Every structure is written in C-alpha cells, then in structure tokens.
Image (cartoon, rainbow, N blue to C red):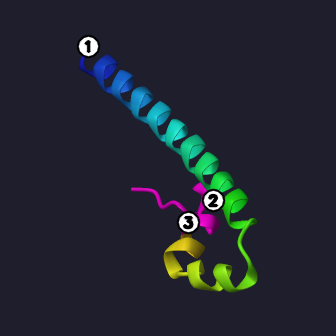
Amino acid sequence: MENLLIFKELTQKEKQIAELHVLIDTLQTNLRAASSYLTKEQKKEINTPSYRWCTAWTPANNFEI
C-alpha cells in the first residue's frame, strides 16, 4: 500500500514538472516575442545575466536531484 502511495506521488510530481516545463517554454516564447519589438539600444539595456539565463534555459540544463 505504501508503495502505491509513493508511486502516485511520484507520478503527480512528474506531471507537475512537465507542466512547469510547458510554462517556461511559453514564457520564453513571449519574452522573445516582446523583445523583438525593442530597438538595438533597448535590447542592450535588458541583456542582463538573468535575461540570458531565462531565454537559454532548457529542461536539458536542469540537474537531477
């Protein structure tokens, strides 16, 4: 019985992770689309480490715990 509960919890966590990956992908797409309306000078202003990290992140960059 305990194994079944652990399996159910694991499955739920995997589903949550997959949904978060979809959310991140959507946010990255929207960020790139919004930044495409900026001038080169404006893009230089927002090209911070966090911007680059956000747009470059992929699930493959994620580490396993």
Which mark is in front, 2 or 1? Answer: 2
Bounds of the magenta span? 54-65
Going 48% across and 41% down the picture, which residue do you hit?
A: 17
Q: Which residue is mark 1?
A: 1
Q: Nearer the viewer, residue 1 or 32?
A: 32
Tag 3: Cα neighbours inside 10 Å, few (<14), some, or many (≥20)? some
For marks 2 and 1, the one nearer the N-term is 1
Q: Which residue is mark 2?
A: 31
SS under mark 1 = loop
Going 74% across and 78% down the picture, which residue do you hit?
A: 39
Looking at the picture, which amino acid does disc 1 mark? Met
Q: Position of residue 62 (x, y in %)?
A: 52, 60
Going 58% across and 84% down the picture, which residue do you hit?
A: 45
Looking at the picture, which amino acid does disc 2 mark? Leu
**Vertical comparison of 39 with 29: above or below:** below
For marks 3 and 1, the one nearer the N-term is 1
Q: Nearer the viewer, residue 43 or 10?
A: 43
Q: Are marks 2 and 3 in contact (CB under 8 Å)?
A: yes
Which mark is in front, 3 or 1? Answer: 3
Q: Say which quadrant the C terminus sits in.
A: bottom left
Label 2 – label 3 distance at C-alpha: 9 Å
Q: Residue furthest top?
A: 1
Question: Is residue 58 a member of the stretch shown in magenta?
Answer: yes
For marks 2 and 3, the one nearer the N-term is 2
Going 63% across and 46% down the picture, which residue do you hit?
A: 26
Q: Are marks 3 and 1 in contact (CB under 8 Å)?
A: no
